[in-house]
Amino acid sequence: MDFKSLTDSELKELAALVATDRFSTGASILDLHARDQSAHAGCRPEAVIWPESAAEVAAILKYANERRIPITGWGAGSSLEGNPIPVCRGVVLDFSRMNRILALREEDFQADVEPGVVYQDLNEKLRHTGLFFPPDPGARATLGGMIANNASGTRTVLYGSTRDYVMRLVVALANGELIELGTRASKSSSGYSLINLFIGSEGTLGIVVEATLRLTGFPAEYSAAVATFPSVPAAARAVYDLKRSGLNPAALELLGPECIALMNKQEALGLDPAPTLFIEFHGPTMSQLAEVLESAREICEGGGCRGFRQGLGRAERDRIFKARHALGEMIQHNHPEHRILIMDVAVPITAYAELLDAMQAEVAAHRLIAYTLSHAGNGNVHLNIAGRRDDPAEWALVQAVSERLVLKAIALGGTATGEHGVGMGKRKYMTAQHGTSLAWMRRVKALFDPHGILNPGKIFP
């Protein structure tokens, strides 16, 4: 869809909808909202607005809808598929000032929040309650962004993704209407689950202005282990065995030897640079966790594990997982002359080893620099592939390798994106994954956003 540039009168009228310090067309501000943390090309918006209330968001959308002005929501800009890049320019709504925790209802295990709340800040506020919000994507992501992308992270294998913790939403539609979806009840069989249309929709159907989140009890105790293996396939097999055992790990991460070597270099962890599983368990007592870890050790050793360090203290566990979360930035900083393409696919556990084999074969065949990071318990793999910035042919090769592997994941019954969303980067795979159902997605989009102003250029090929 083609959009016209904003006129001077439209800019003035938009500016009048908020306080003067919450509207900007300054070059530096536009540049800050032109790209996310992905390798996708940036695009400057024409204006940035910082709303402070649902009513302001509704008024802005109503105005934009009447004049066919593109609107893109912005949380923290930590997305990895170009999800918040304003590819059709227009206006970016930056939600950093809608960052209030509206209510904590401890006895209901619930919190009401605005979209600009950073999830770590919510958990810090909850520390004294014994409750927490489990999804943990690593970056300082906002809850609005996490809802838009259905974010997950290292603890998904036990706790699930953001979708599992969203009970109620207030959403501003393209026409400026505010609607409430879901309920504060712990379960409901009433009507269509419209709330699930908006979770993971990347701001293409409406913009979340308030959410009620389900919380859960913080584990009384937790313990971790590091298991090293002679090969990636051996580690992948151990993942299947651990899942089948019913031990219910809270985190089950597989990292290639190149990742371990980089973490050692950056953080002096002293780990064996081999294919490695980081395993974490949560439980009521340390004695119960000791039994669980012993069972995990037996399973890993039965799968050829050549080293199993269990019962890591909290400080060591925190150091390792902090380094795990920082791996993406470490890779980029270690290869400043390269762009990094971050693959994000997921397959059934039974196809996990086959997918990893295909990735290793592609990387070896083309002698590429690549790092394998995986939320192994969910069959979710990130392959970070480096291509030199000054070598278009190598970058084209990186993209071609990525495309073959994404299509391989889909052919194995998986998905083109396990947690990063479709954004700009995965649009071309939507037909391959969804087939004729993609036409129904388009109809849903047309119903909620008939003029296509909400985050245009995303999801649909």
Image (cartoon, grey):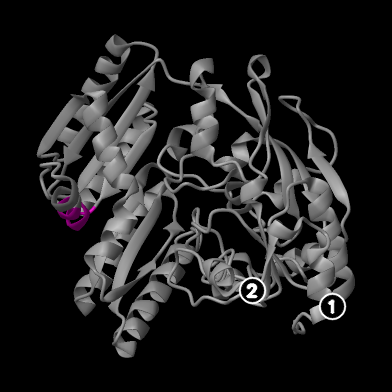
Q: Mark 2 highlights which residue?
A: 45
Q: Position of residue 192 (x, y in %)?
A: 82, 43
Range of the magenta residues? 256-262
User: With 79 as the anchor, is 357 left or right in this view?
Assistant: left
Q: Main secondary structure of the magenta part?
A: helix
Neighbour tally class for label 2: few under 14, some 14-19, many 20 plus, Cα within 10 Å: many
Decide whether residue 261 is among the magenta residues. yes
Between 372 and 22, the residue placed more toward the observer is 22
Q: Mark 1 highlights which residue?
A: 9
- Give the residue type at disc 1: Ser
* 1 or 2: mark nearer the eye: 1
Decide whether residue 87 is among the magenta residues. no
Q: Residue at x 80, y 82 (%)?
A: 7
Examine the image and state in which quarter residue 287 appears. top left
User: With 19 as the anchor, is 387 left or right in this view?
Assistant: left
Examine the image and state in which quarter residue 269 appears. top left
Q: Residue at x 60, y 69 (%)?
A: 430
Neighbour tally class for label 1: few under 14, some 14-19, many 20 plus, Cα within 10 Å: few
In the image, residue 140 sits, relative to residue 23, either above or below, namely above
In the image, residue 366 sits, relative to residue 145, either above or below, namely below
User: With 150 as the anchor, is 339 left or right in this view?
Assistant: left
Instruction: Name the quadrant of the C terminus.
Output: bottom right
Q: Position of residue 108 (x, y in %)?
A: 68, 18
- SS at mark 2 in the image: loop
Which tag, 1 or 2, sits closer to the chain's start?
Answer: 1
> Disc 1, disc 2: CB below 8 Å?
no
Between 146 and 44, the residue placed more toward the observer is 44
- SS at mark 1 in the image: helix
Instruction: Name the quadrant of the N terminus.
Output: bottom right
Q: Residue at x 67, y 75 (%)?
A: 46
